[in-house]
Image (cartoon, helix red, strand yellow):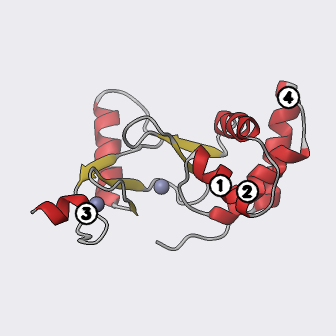
């Protein structure tokens, strides 16, 4: 799915305001992490980001990456997903508003999609229960059709 490239400067401003307000240390490393996330422009785990930053020659510790991801999630710049198992995946909230995820339970492949019908269901359910709908997050667990990487397909 196409996505417009993120406005990194605006995100940095938002992050800087948050750090100041909460009195966290305003270190260059944290902004570097945000830069690299914007370059990635996809879902990633903390370990994947660590490996990516290492290949780019950044000397940022795993601990800094974990704590920065935590802060970026707290100020809503990042969305944190738990697709399956324990490893959390992150993505920029601004990337693709209100998209949902189809997750292959065999190979872990994640496909993003937009289905407007789901927005309708969200709004109806929330209103019927007296809530004001804001956003939603839906995960569909399935098996993908890739015969090369997906174990499930090799077994059938
Ligand atoms: Zn996504
Ligand atoms: Zn698969």
Density class for disc 4 (Cα within 10 Å; few <14, some 14-19, many ≥20) is few
Q: Nearer the viewer, mark 3 or mark 4?
A: 3
Could you tell me which secondary element the residue under label 2 belongs to? helix
- From this view, report whether residue 111 is shown above or below residue 16: below
Where is mark 2, residue-wise? 54
**Residue 136 position in % (x across, y down):** 42, 43
- From this view, report whether residue 109 is shown above or below residue 140: below
The CB of the residue at mark 4 lies under 8 Å from ligand 1: no
**Residue 70 position in % (x across, y down):** 66, 34
- Residue 38 shown left or right of residue 138 in the figure: right
| Residue at the spot 36% in from the left edge and 41% down from the top edge | 84
Calculate the distance from the C-alpha at mark 3 to the C-alpha at mark 4.
42 Å
Label 3 vs 4, first from the N-terminus: 4
Label 4 vs 1, first from the N-terminus: 4
Q: Nearer the viewer, mark 4 or mark 2?
A: 2
Q: Are marks 4 and 1 in contact (CB under 8 Å)?
A: no
Q: Looking at the rendered structure, which numbered label has been put on residue 24? A: 4
- Residue 47 shown left or right of residue 12 in the figure: left
Could you tell me which secondary element the residue under label 4 belongs to? loop
The CB of the residue at mark 3 lies under 8 Å from ligand 2: yes
Where is mark 1, residue-wise? 51
Density class for disc 3 (Cα within 10 Å; few <14, some 14-19, many ≥20) is many
Could you tell me which secondary element the residue under label 3 belongs to? loop
Calculate the distance from the C-alpha at mark 4 to the C-alpha at mark 1.
25 Å
Where is mark 3, residue-wise? 144
**Residue 56 position in % (x across, y down):** 76, 64
Quarter assignment of residue 54 = bottom right
Could you tell me which secondary element the residue under label 1 belongs to? helix
Calculate the distance from the C-alpha at mark 4 to the C-alpha at mark 2.
25 Å
């Amino acid at each position: 799915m196409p996505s417009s490239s993120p406005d990194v400067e605006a995100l940095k401003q938002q992050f800087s305001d948050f750090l100041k307000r909460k009195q966290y240390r305003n270190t260059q490393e944290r902004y570097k992490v945000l830069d690299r996330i914007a370059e990635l422009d996809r879902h990633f785990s903390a370990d994947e980001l660590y490996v990516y930053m290492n290949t780019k020659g950044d000397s940022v510790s795993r601990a800094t990456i974990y704590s920065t991801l935590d802060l970026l999630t707290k100020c809503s710049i990042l969305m944190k997903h738990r697709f399956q198992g324990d490893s959390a995946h992150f993505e920029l909230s601004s990337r693709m508003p209100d998209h949902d995820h189809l997750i292959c339970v065999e190979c872990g492949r994640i496909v993003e999609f937009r289905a407007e019908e789901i927005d309708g269901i969200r709004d109806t359910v929330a209103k019927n229960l007296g809530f004001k709908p804001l956003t939603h997050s839906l995960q569909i667990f399935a098996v993908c059709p890739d015969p090369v990487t997906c174990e499930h397909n090799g077994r059938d």
